[in-house]
Image: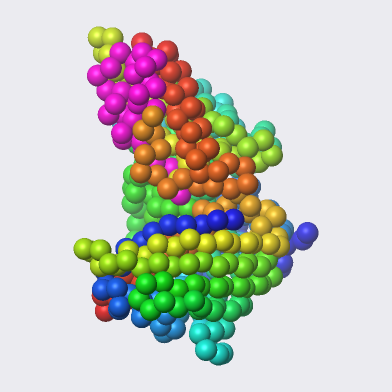
C-alpha cells in the first residue's frame, strides 16, 4: 500500500529538528524500519515526517572518559562492524549483528530502535546488561537518562514529546570481561521471543561481577538482579549457572502470543539465560 | 486470546464496585477515551483514539455491563472497530476486599482482527496488558481526588 499524504522535512541541525517537532504532531524518522511499514499499512498516518538523516551530530562512534558514544543515527551494521565497538564493547557489537536481517541492519538505527522500545527488540537486553545511558536533546537542553529509567513499558519510554535521542553511551569493557547475547528468534520477523545478554568478570576463579539483561519476556527489557546475585561469588559451574538462571523470570508478567505462551517464554528465558551465562563464563578470563 | 491479571485499587469494595461502573470515571480512565455515552441500561457507546508507538487509530464501539452481583463481580463486554481493525472482548471482574483496599481480578477473552491483528499478532497481549495497566493507574489517581 501507499502511505497517506504527509509533509516531509529534512532539517540539518538538532535545533532545527527540535523546532519542527515542537508542535507535537510531527513524527521523527530515523531508519524507518518500523515507521515506514506502519505508514504503508496506514496504521500510522502522521501529517508531518521529520527525517533525521541529515541532522549533524547524530552520527559517529567515539570513545571518551571510559565510555563509548554511539550516535543515534548509526545503523546496526555500523555498530556491529565498528572496530572500536567490537574491541571495547563486544556485547553491543554482537547484539547488533543479531538484529533482524541484513537489510534491516543496513537501514535501521540504534536511536530509532531504542526510541521505538519494542518489547522484543534485541538492543534493550544488551543496554540493560551494559547499564547504558541515553542522551536526549530537548528545548530545555540535553539530559542523560539510564536505560533502566528510559525503558518504561511496551513501546513506552521516558522520551518526552518534542525530544530527540542524540546518542547512546555504553561503558568500555575492562579486559577479561566475558560477554554473550543469546536469543530464541521468531524466524519470520527476526525479533527475539526471548533474548538474554550477559557480562561476567572473574577474580581469583570466582565470579566477581555479573550483569544480565533480558528482552522479549516482559513488557520491557529488564535487568535480572536475582540471577546476578546468585552468580556472584560462585565459580560459575554448570550447577551454579542452572541455579542462577532458574530465577530469571521471577516476578515478571510474561508475554504471550501465537508464537510462544507465557509459560514457554519463561522456560525459554531460563534455557537461553543459562546458555548466555555459560558462554560469557567461558569467555571471561 | 485469554487475558487475566489482578490490580489493586485503594478504595473500599463498595466504592470500587461503584467507580468501576461509573461512566464519568470510566471515560477519564480508559486510555484514549474521547466519549462514553449511555445508550441503554448498562450499555454505552464509546469513541476512543488509541496511540501506541507510531500507531494511532480511532475506534468506535460499545461497552456493556452484565451479570452484576453487587460489590463482588460483574461482566464487561466490549467491542469496537476502526480503520485499523476490530476487537471484541469479554471479561469477568471480581472484587475482593484486602488491607490496601480492593483487589480486582479479571479474566477474559479478547479477539482482535483486521490489519492490526495481521501485522501485530505478537503484540496484542503486551498491548492489552499495557492498556489495562494504564486504566488502573488512572483509576488510582481518580480515586484519590
Which quarter shows the C terminus of chain A? top left
Q: Is residue A189 visible?
A: yes
Image: magenta residue range? A219-245
Percent across and percent down for residue A43 are 66, 62
Eyeballing the image, is B67 above or below A134? below
Of A180 and A11, the residue lying toward us: A180
Which quarter shows the N terminus of chain A? bottom right
Q: Is residue A31 left or right of residue A251?
A: right
At x 42%, y 14%, the residue is A283
At x 51%, y 38%, the residue is A265
Eyeballing the image, is A275 above or below B131? above
Based on the picture, tell me whether residue A41 belongs to the magenta stretch.
no
Q: Is residue A276 visible?
A: no
- The image quarter containing residue A284 is top left
Percent across and percent down for residue B96 are 32, 66
Percent across and percent down for residue B118 are 70, 55
Tell which residue pokes out farthest to the right in this image: A1
Tell which residue pokes out farthest to the left in this image: B99
Amino acid at each position: 500500500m501507499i502511505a497517506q499524504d504527509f509533509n516531509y522535512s529534512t532539517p540539518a541541525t538538532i535545533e532545527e529538528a527540535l523546532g519542527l517537532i515542537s508542535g507535537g504532531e510531527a513524527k521523527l524518522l530515523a531508519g524507518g524500519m518500523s515507521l515506514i511499514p506502519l505508514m504503508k499499512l496506514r496504521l500510522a498516518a502522521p501529517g508531518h515526517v521529520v527525517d533525521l538523516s541529515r541532522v549533524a551530530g547524530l552520527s559517529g562512534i567515539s570513545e571518551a572518559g571510559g565510555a563509548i558514544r554511539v550516535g543515534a543515527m548509526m545503523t546496526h551494521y555500523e555498530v556491529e562492524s565498528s572496530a572500536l565497538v567490537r574491541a571495547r564493547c563486544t556485547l553491543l557489537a554482537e547484539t547488533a549483528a543479531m538484529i533482524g536481517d541484513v537489510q534491516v541492519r543496513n537501514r535501521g538505527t540504534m536511536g530509532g530502535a531504542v526510541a521505538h522500545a519494542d518489547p522484543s527488540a534485541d538492543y534493550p537486553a544488551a543496554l540493560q546488561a551494559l547499564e547504558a545511558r541515553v542522551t536526549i536533546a530537548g528545548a530545555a537542553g540535553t539530559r542523560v537518562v539510564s536505560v533502566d529509567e528510559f525503558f518504561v513499558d511496551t513501546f513506552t519510554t521516558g522520551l518526552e514529546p518534542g525530544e530527540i535521542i542524540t546518542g547512546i553511551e555504553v561503558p568500555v569493557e575492562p579486559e577479561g570481561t566475558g560477554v554473550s547475547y543469546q536469543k530464541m528468534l521468531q524466524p519470520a520477523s527476526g525479533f527475539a521471543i526471548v533474548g538474554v545478554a550477559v557480562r561476567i568478570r572473574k577474580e581469583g576463579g570466582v565470579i566477581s561481577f555479573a550483569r544480565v539483561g533480558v528482552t522479549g519476556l516482559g513488557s520491557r527489557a529488564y535487568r535480572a538482579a536475582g540471577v546476578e546475585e546468585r552468580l556472584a561469588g560462585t565459580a560459575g559451574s554448570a550447577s551454579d549457572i542452572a541455579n542462577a538462571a532458574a530465577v530469571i523470570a521471577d516476578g515478571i508478567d510474561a508475554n504471550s502470543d501465537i508464537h510462544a505462551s507465557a509459560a514457554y517464554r519463561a522456560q525459554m528465558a531460563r534455557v537461553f539465560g543459562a546458555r548466555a551465562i555459560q558462554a560469557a563464563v567461558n569467555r571471561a578470563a | 486470546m485469554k487475558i487475566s491479571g489482578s490490580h489493586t485499587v485503594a478504595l473500599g469494595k463498595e466504592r470500587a464496585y461503584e467507580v468501576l461502573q461509573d461512566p464519568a470515571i470510566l471515560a477519564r480512565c480508559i486510555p484514549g477515551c474521547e466519549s462514553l455515552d449511555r445508550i441503554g441500561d448498562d450499555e454505552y457507546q464509546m469513541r476512543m483514539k488509541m496511540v501506541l508507538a507510531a500507531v494511532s487509530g480511532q475506534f468506535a464501539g460499545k461497552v456493556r455491563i452484565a451479570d452484576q452481583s453487587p460489590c463482588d463481580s460483574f461482566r464487561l463486554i466490549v467491542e469496537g472497530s476502526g480503520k485499523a481493525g476490530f476487537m471484541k472482548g469479554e471479561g469477568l471482574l471480581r472484587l475482593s476486599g484486602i488491607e490496601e483496599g480492593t483487589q480486582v481480578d479479571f479474566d477474559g477473552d479478547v479477539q482482535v482482527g483486521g490489519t492490526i491483528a495481521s501485522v501485530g499478532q505478537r503484540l496484542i497481549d503486551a498491548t492489552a496488558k499495557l492498556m489495562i495497566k494504564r486504566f488502573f493507574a488512572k483509576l488510582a489517581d481518580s480515586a484519590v481526588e
